[in-house]
Amino acid sequence: MRFERLKIAALLMLATSAALPLASAQAVSASVAAATASEVLAPGERLTANAYRQSPNGLYRLVQYADGNLVVVDTATKKPLWNAQTHGNPGAYTHLQTDGNVVVKSAEGTALWSTKTHGNPQARLVVQNDSNLVLYSGTKALWSSRRSTSVLAPGERLTANAYRQSPNGLYRLVQYADGNLVVVDTATKKPLWSTKTHGNPKAYTQLQTDGNIVVKSPEGKVLWASKTHGNPQARLVVQNDGNTVLYSSDGEEGLWSTRTSR
């Protein structure tokens, strides 16, 4: 009888110890899931002041700064790699709307910047190990920080000190606070081309939805234009060769350029 009780106790101990690896595996699995979730901004989620998402390797962060700017940062060097240029708006936050549009909004709810990707419910924003910030719908990339850095899309504006930069970082198209739109060599700081619209503080550049690039005064007066209207969905690209080119919607035809290729 005593032997039987000991046998039963031994079997129970074996069963319990056999269950431990499974419980352990489940705990590890849960912790991995928690870790991978930190790189994703899910539909409906917000980033408020100083909140962030981080790449799985820990090298890059998407940070909502308290000044309103949304920034991708190299965590080792603290160098900003991309930003939404929405600084000067304390209390602003970033919202991945349930329609798939990523929007930086002021404290009052005014849209300051967006990816213009509505119509994609369940899209998710991911901070990748290669430093790229990508909005995915399933496996399809809808938007990325690398693309957006070099491209001025239809309807977008460049206001004072905003810019677009070539993927290699060597050239920038900058809207200066004095009103001038300039292509600059980032190494030498030398201007390669400009619209010669200085003397107009608070002027801005807009790629209109008709394909015309226009520098306008704060009152809306046209100061300079590329005269390329009639090309809806055209986009302006700052290239690695130093040239800034307006491409047709299919990307095949160069409609206008600064002719600053190196």
Image (tube, rainbow, N blue to C red):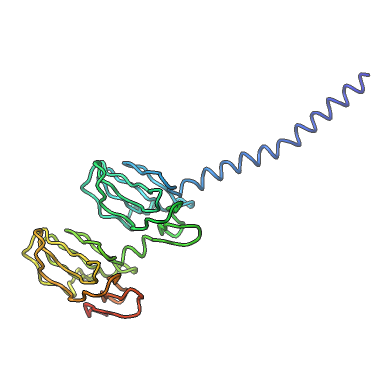
Measured as percent of width and height from the top left, residue 242 is found at 27, 75
Q: Residue at x 31, y 63 (%)?
A: 149
- Location of residue 170 by image quarter: bottom left
Q: Residue at x 23, y 75 (%)?
A: 230
Measured as percent of width and height from the top left, residue 125 is found at 42, 53
Compared with residue 11, is residue 246 higher up or lower down, i.e. above or below?
below
Q: How many numbered marks appear?
A: 0
- Seen from the viewer's position, the closer of residues 255 and 17 is 255
Measured as percent of width and height from the top left, residue 179 is found at 11, 63
Compared with residue 235, is residue 204 higher up or lower down, i.e. above or below?
above
Measured as percent of width and height from the top left, residue 31 is found at 56, 41
Q: Give the farthest residue toward the top.
A: 1
Compared with residue 83, is residue 214 higher up or lower down, i.e. above or below?
below
**Image quadrant for the C terminus?**
bottom left
- Horizontal side of 87 relative to 48 (left or right) equals left
**Image quadrant for the N terminus?**
top right
- Horizontal side of 36 relative to 43 (left or right) equals right
- Seen from the viewer's position, the closer of residues 186 and 253 is 253
- Location of residue 32 by image quarter: top right
